[in-house]
Image (cartoon, coloured by chain):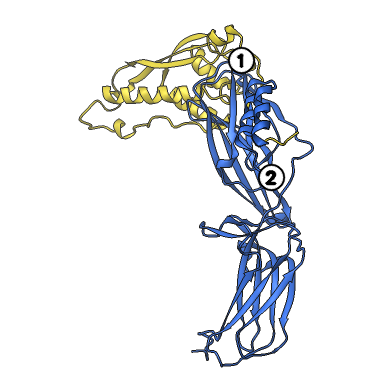
Chain colours: A blue, B yellow
Amino acid sequence: MSFFGFGQTAEIDIVLNDAETRKKAEHKTEDGKKDKYFLFYDGETVSGKVNVTLKTPGKRLEHYGIKIEFVGQIELYYDRGNHHEFVSLVKDLARPGELTQSQTFDFEFTHVEKPYESYTGQNVKLRYFLRATVSRRLNDISKEMDIVVQTLCTYPELNSSIKMEVGIEDCLHIEFEYNKSKYHLRDVIVGKIYFLLVRIKIKHMEINIIKRETTGTGPSVYHENDTIAKYEIMDGAPVRGESIPIRLFLAGYELTPTMRDINKKFSVRYYLNLVLIDEEERRYFKQQEITLWRKGDIVRRSMSQQASIAAQRFEGSNSETASAQAKEESN
Amino acid sequence: MSEATVADTRRLNSKPQDLTDAYGPPSNFLEIDVFDPQTIGVGRNRFTTYEVRMKTNLPIFKLKESCVRRRYSDFEWLKNELERDSKIVVPPLPGKALKRQLPFRGDEGIFEESFIEERRAGLEQFINRIAGHPLAQNERCLHMFLQDESIDRNYIPGKVRQ
């Protein structure tokens, strides 16, 4: 059996030092399934142990070296052979020789740079993984362990609202407004549509979130559009002077941060598409790009503090009794 | 000042709507009826005309009410003009029914009541879909079809300005 390399003479597995405490994040695989992987951020150290277990104790394992690699790579589905590695670190664990018994090797990749977020898309994949290899004459024994990397941002300094007047001359004029141009992944899009002129028979209006994945460069650029969300904001025919509110919660949708020209290989951008549909099923639309970013989790406040913040918002004035009560409770 | 975790979901400010805008007549009134089919002529030179009545308050149309008589070939002419000049995808007309025009049929062929009714309904749907289209509303051929007494096939194609 081992003559054909069919049954491995040894098994490798990789275990992280902080496997008990480190958080896991859900990430979609290429075939759509969701799996959990250890979550890392830029600059964090990746350390652990590589266990090489001999299947038949007593039988020696000759090898040409044992190493562990930390790899960050971009894979374009139409060009599977070429992996574009943007992070590639190696640690040698053992010089060529032989193993007489199962052994464990420690490794540490200190303060590893992880510049991009893990992404699995329609035509491209960006992933980070650890790969432990026992090199041998005929065939190597190796094991890969995928990890997920997320890139965090803080509130942008400049976050202007989007406000525009659009339309078809003498037929339909609207003014649309979205409260921000940059939203975090659990944010709310608050806006409104104001009708200046309506000479067509509108049946309903909806807002769509479109994800556009761009792969390739130069003449072979390919855009893949995907409508992530469709949200009806108006049913019926509006007249001049009417104002329709928008309140769209992003947390319910599968979104990633906006990724621009990652390693010059791909981009993922998001657009809000305002669509009006008339009685003859004709569609009138206006697309607007928004920037999505990932906010780090902050310390949760007590329930009463959250309630007092919400009350202040609703009343539009400082509710002194509510905040005083909250202070008392947290003491 | 502690960072709030509750999102601000208040509506944006908007101007209150004027009551005349809210309760006034809508600016998108457009109704076209195709009815009263009449078969004129005798024998092999018969043909059917339909009354096309339009009521609208759209400013692009010169007349707010109009009433003309048109036959199937007039609708075909309009379809061809729009396909050539406008950027819209012109909806289909009800069929030409060539089979019905062959001799030795048991029934009245294209002058059969049920067929005329089917055709009338199709023509009504066709003309309403076109007249409501913002990119077809300013075509000279459409205005001539709906509001002029007769169609001048030697007209100069172009756009109508408001």
In 3D space, how far apart are the residues under numbered discs 1 and 2 (Cα atoms)? 37 Å
Q: Tell me the residue at 64%/25% (across/down).
A: A322
Q: Residues within 10 Å of mark 1 (few under 14, many from 20)?
A: many
Q: Amino acid at mark 2?
A: Lys
Q: Quadrant of residue A18?
A: bottom right
Task: Identify the image quadrant of the C terminus of chain A.
Answer: top right
Along the polypeptide, which appears first: circle 1 or circle 2? Answer: 1
Q: Residue A120: x and y, percent? A: 60, 57
| Depth check, front residue: A137 or A261 | A137
Q: Tell me the residue at 67%/46% (across/down).
A: A297
Q: Tell me the residue at 26%/32% (across/down).
A: B103
Q: Which residue is mark 1?
A: A241
Q: Quadrant of residue A289?
A: top right
The disc numbered 1 marks a residue on which chain? A
Q: Residue furthest right?
A: A157
Q: Secondary structure at mark 2?
A: loop
Residue A279 in sight in this render:
yes
The disc numbered 2 marks a residue on which chain? A
**A45 over B157 or under it: above or below:** below
**B140 over B100 or under it: above or below:** above
**A318 over A213 or under it: above or below:** above
Q: Is residue A171 left or right of residue A86?
A: left
Q: Residue A83: x and y, percent? A: 67, 67
Q: Residues within 10 Å of mark 2 (few under 14, many from 20)?
A: some
Q: Amino acid at mark 1?
A: Gly
| Depth check, front residue: A219 or A146 | A146
Residue A69 disc label: none
Q: Quadrant of residue A113?
A: bottom right
**How many marks are shown on the rendered structure?**
2
Q: Which residue is mark 2?
A: A295
